[in-house]
Image (tube, rainbow, N blue to C red):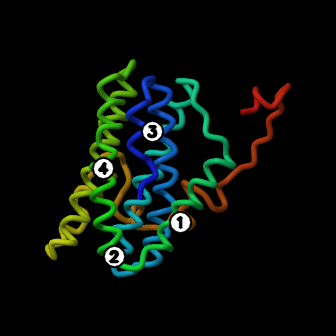
């Protein structure tokens, strides 16, 4: 695809570097899967659930990232989402994205294993384990579709249900969900002495 290019995380040494790459990758994934759900309506439920899973991971990365001194500014987050959406629009067939996703998940597994193995807290280890599990869920569903024996995204929905997200919530596009956007959003203003502090 490949947002998380191998050289980026092979050279990453610190928890902060790994966390930033993971967080940015999940933001890219939100835009990717939301747009794929629109492009391939026959797979809309599973692809929307994939986007929900990516969005859940973004929210899991955020507080742990902040605690580790990692920040992804809003402008950068929006840019990553747009890049994911643009990539999805460039894909012409579902089998193409399925093959790419299978390859990408294999490429990114070592990143999440590194996060889990080198975690400095139990919370970061749990995040690394969850991120690894979600890659496995994506890979298994796409592979089952390519094999002509769809598993319906069983691992994707199981991952989300384990985290308190029902199937109905999982397949509801983010723009229609009150818990992650729409009318429930709030504008928060903050003032900082300089640009570096604001970042």
User: In the drawing, what numbered circle is on residue 135?
Assistant: 4
Q: Which label's residue is closer to the chain start, 3 or 2?
A: 3
Residue on which the image places disc 1:
85
Q: Residue at x 41, y 36 (%)?
A: 9
As helix, strand or loop, the secondary structure at mark 4 comes to helix
Whole-percent x, y for residue 156 in the image: 29, 57
Q: CA distance from mark 4 to mark 3?
A: 18 Å
Residue on which the image places disc 2:
94
As helix, strand or loop, the secondary structure at mark 3 comes to helix
Q: Which label's residue is closer to the chain start, 3 or 1?
A: 3
Whole-percent x, y for residue 8 in the image: 45, 38
Asked if one can make out residue 102 in the rendered structure from this viewpoint, the answer is yes
Whole-percent x, y for residue 78 in the image: 63, 54
- Mark whose residue sits in front, 3 or 1: 3
Q: Which label's residue is closer to the chain start, 2 or 1?
A: 1
Quadrant of the snapshot with the C terminus: top right
As helix, strand or loop, the secondary structure at mark 1 comes to helix
User: In the drawing, what numbered circle is on residue 8?
Assistant: 3
Q: Which label's residue is closer to the chain start, 4 or 3?
A: 3
């Amino acid at each position: 695809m490949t947002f998380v290019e191998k050289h980026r995380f092979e050279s990453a040494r610190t928890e902060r570097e790994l966390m930033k790459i993971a967080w940015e990758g999940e933001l890219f994934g939100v835009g990717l899967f939301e747009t794929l759900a629109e492009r391939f309506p026959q797979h809309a439920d599973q692809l929307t659930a994939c986007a929900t899973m990516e969005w859940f991971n973004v929210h899991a990365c955020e507080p742990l990232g902040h605690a580790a001194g990692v920040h992804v500014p809003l402008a950068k987050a929006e840019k990553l989402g747009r890049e994911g959406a643009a990539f999805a629009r460039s894909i012409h067939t579902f089998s193409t994205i399925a093959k790419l996703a299978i390859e990408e998940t294999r490429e990114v597994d070592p990143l999440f294993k590194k996060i889990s193995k080198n975690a400095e807290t139990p919370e970061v280890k749990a995040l690394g384990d969850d991120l690894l599990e979600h890659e496995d869920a994506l890979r298994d569903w796409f592979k089952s579709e390519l094999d002509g024996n769809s598993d319906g995204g069983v691992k994707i929905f199981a991952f989300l249900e384990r985290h308190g997200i029902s199937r109905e919530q999982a397949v509801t596009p983010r723009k229609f969900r009150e818990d992650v956007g729409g009318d429930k959003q709030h504008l928060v203003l903050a003032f900082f002495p300089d640009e570096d502090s604001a970042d």
